[in-house]
Amino acid sequence: MGTDKVKSPKIDIPFQAPPLAPNFVERPSQQQAVKAVLLWQGAFNQGTLVVTAIYGLGGIGKSTLAAATAHDEDVKACFTDGVLWATLSKEPDLLQLLSSWIQALGDNNYKPIKPDDAKRHLQTLLYNKKVLLVVDDAWNSEHVEYFQVGSGGCRVLVTTREAVIPGASRYDLDVMTKSESLKLLENQPQPRQLTQAEKQQAELLAETVGYLPLALELAAAQIADGITWSELLEDLRAEIAHLDTLDLFVNCSSEEKRKKYSLVASFNLSLNSLTPELLQQFAWFGVLPEDVVITHAMGATLWGINPRQALTILRQLRSKALLQTGTIQFDNKPTYRLHDLIHDVAVGLLTDEKVPNQSEKLPGLGLSLTAAHSALLNRYREKTQSGQWHTLPTDGYIHAHLTWHFKQANQLLQIHQLLQEETPAGGNGWYEACASLGQTANFVTDVARAWQLAEDSWTLTTLPQVIGLQCRYALIIASLNSLAANLPVELLIALVQKNVWTPEQGLAYVLQSSNPRQKANLLTELVNHLPPNLKQLGLSKALAAAREIQDESSRADALSSLADKLPPDLLPEALAAARSIQSEEYRAKALSSLADKLPELLPEALAAAREIQDERYRAEALSSLADKLPPELLPEALAAAREIQSESTRAEALSSLADKLSQIQKTSLFNHWRDTLHILFVHTRPNLLSDINALTPAIPALGGQQAVKDTADAIQDVSRWWG
């Protein structure tokens, strides 16, 4: 009986790579080298997931090289299913980043509760797809592993300063060449041809800043603002000399020091060019976490102005190369991001003294980080209804970072209170707020953060309160887990058949189950309702789950249920799983179920059946094999049946074999039949008559009239000997 074909929703092909800056300069040798690895056809043929890692100093252009690679026409032609981009930084919210990839692939309903769940679902969504997966600014190789989720048609491109990425093809990015640096300095917002004298000064400037792209961008912005080449070069040299006297980078090589000093000097000169008000507004970026999306709506709260004014300020800072353009839009307006080195500068300004001791230092805001976070939270509270945080209007930022700011402000009680807020209808306010934005992952992260805070605050005096909070958060997670994994198979199939869930979602929810037996059972049923491109993956996951089942009886049942659905390439793994079963009974059952697909297993399955000590189970195993055995194995099966002592059990086994024998025309089995009778006579067994009766249906096929006569003689002998 067929089922209606379930169609996945049509989605736009995602392309999350950030746009290239207007003054972007090609770096042909570097781009070609990285592209060659990504497009290596040998890896596509092998079906392996190639990982390439771009290494280099901060500000050397790793992210820009990755973005340029993603924008390359050959790369886009190869990765026809799009480009996904995740910027990790030091402390990434893995669940939120993985969930954003899931949504980019068109699934806005699946709600993972753990990074592992999200990773498994991404493996489902990316199965048989060709997507470039960019993992930017990685600090920890363990974080990168969560994003290595594609099949052989995907590639992973990582940028990192120093994290060792196991198995990755390493590419070390160096600074720009002299010609590339000169071109970057020429490519102002309004590119113009430099005079010969200007070129000479530009070359000196590029050398002074160590040919670092970020320093060159800052310098180019200064030139665009009207600073002359000679003035900028003089100021840079003086600033670098001053920094060198401070000896800020003690453990660096001289070349590395030079590059870092050139960056710091470029930052300082760019900030010196800001008005006092704009400098203070820039300093407030220090209250934000690294690598966040900066929207004009968030900027309005950050600075206490209206959104239109905030957008103007963001554009000003972008024109000075202190901001970079973001990868998405918010409310049809551009978004922005901070390079992490510039973010470090902002943090310093936020906490530096308002009146510095040294005249050359810029004035800071003089705030502690705790006070700065508290001030920002007060501004956000003013936007709530009656102080209820779940009523905050969306600004593309705060819902993902509210509890983080609470923690930084040391307002830990506010986190617990946030998760207890209720809507007028009695629902969990914060959950509904996050869910309405498609950010359930943020809610799960917040619960996990609150749970950890409760554990960390444990003392004898707070024990009752801590236990109460832990129970509450455990129940929340358990509820989410229950919704995600503990589904009756009938409900699961109905949800997929009725298009409530896509096949990808159904598969993903099943994979969240931590119970291998349940997972194998659900997957075995679900694969009947999956499209061809997912069926293979579902069967592979079902087989893996079956192998994890500890109870051997249940493992044999799971393998038996899967046997007739497995494609040829999964049969060796299933066979290994069957052979690993220690119990002769369950091993024989599993081997027997696989014999239809692997006829060469029949001798092994029959041998396993003969080894079963319990006669009842041995008879059952022989019966399950009976209709599969070829003629040459029937004598052995008959012998195994004869060895059973219990008359009724032996008759059951012989009866199942008789059905098989009755289908065979005259064969050499007639001689075996006579041998059988002879052996039985020698042993003078009193239950010979039941054996013969069990085999009676097969007698004519075994040897015609002679077999009938031999049988009649045997019956007479038994009657005479045993009355």
Image (cartoon, rainbow, N blue to C red):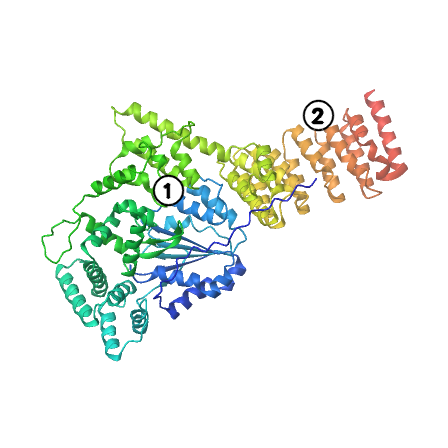
Q: Can residue 161 be seen in this view?
A: no
Q: Can residue 207 be seen in this view?
A: yes
- Disc 2: which residue: 646
Q: Position of residue 167 (x, y in %)?
A: 41, 56
Check the image and report above or below for 407 versus 226. above
**Tag 1's secondary structure?**
loop
Kind of residue at disc 1: Thr
User: In the picture provided, is 197 more to the left or to the right than 108?
Assistant: left
Name the residue nearer the viewer: 77 or 563.
77
Q: Which of marks 1 and 2 is in front?
A: 1
Check the image and report above or below for 288 versus 684. below
**Tag 2's secondary structure?**
loop
- The quarter of the picture where the N terminus appears is top right
User: In the picture provided, is 550 more to the left or to the right than 380?
Assistant: right
Q: Residues within 10 Å of mark 2 (few under 14, many from 20)?
A: few
- The quarter of the picture where the C terminus appears is top right
Q: Where is residue 376 in the image (x, y as percent from the top left)?
A: 26, 42
Check the image and report above or below for 133 versus 503. below
Name the residue nearer the viewer: 157 or 561.
157
- Estimate the spatial distance between the alpha carbons at disc 1 and disc 2, rounded to whole Å: 76 Å
- Disc 1: which residue: 394
User: Which quadrant of the view contains residue 635?
Assistant: top right
Q: Position of residue 75 (x, y in %)?
A: 47, 63
Determine whether label 1 and label 2 are within 8 Å by CB. no
